Amino acid sequence: MARSINRHFQFLGSSKDVRSGRLWYPAADVYQTEEGWLVKVELAGVSAEDVEIDVQGDTLYIAGCRKDRSCAGGNTYHQMEITYSSFEKTLNFPASIEGAKVEHNFENGLLIIHLKKAAKA
């Protein structure tokens, strides 16, 4: 029985099933703080220059691409589980974040975004 199940999973995940090229959606955590919002997005292996952040109304849009920069051309793969392609993440907030001061940095594979409340007039 176990051998049959393993064979089934090997068929489903054969080496012909390369994950590169598909759009993927990274995981994110959102926290409300006294200063505004803190957003953490799981983006291991993504370079800062390959990320776009946009705020419109109550929506935070994050997009970019993870590229495989460590593998030289001419190699053939044995196993490929990491997705190297475009990604996007859209987060909706309970109120407008338009005009928020956006600060971001990368820390241990996470994109950390601080959305600081706009100063009241």
Image: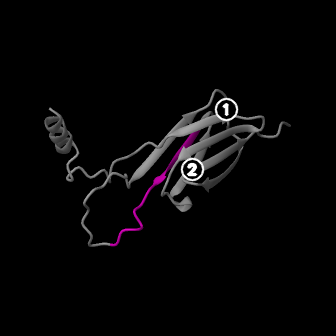
Q: Position of residue 49 (x, y in %)?
A: 54, 61
Say whether residue 118 is magenta.
no
Look at the image and give the residue range highlighted in magenta: 60-72
Name the residue carrying label 1: 96
Q: Amino acid at mark 1?
A: Ser
Q: Amino acid at mark 2?
A: Leu
Residue 118 shown left or right of residue 82 in the figure = right
The label nearer to you, 1 versus 2, is 2
Quarter where residue 9 is shown: top left
**Quadrant assignment for the N terminus:** top left
Q: Residue at x 64, y 26 (%)?
A: 94
Quarter where residue 66 is shown: bottom left
Q: Position of residue 114 (x, y in %)?
A: 69, 45
Quarter where residue 56 is shown: top right
Q: Residue at x 62, y 31 (%)?
A: 93
Q: Residue at x 16, y 43 (%)?
A: 11
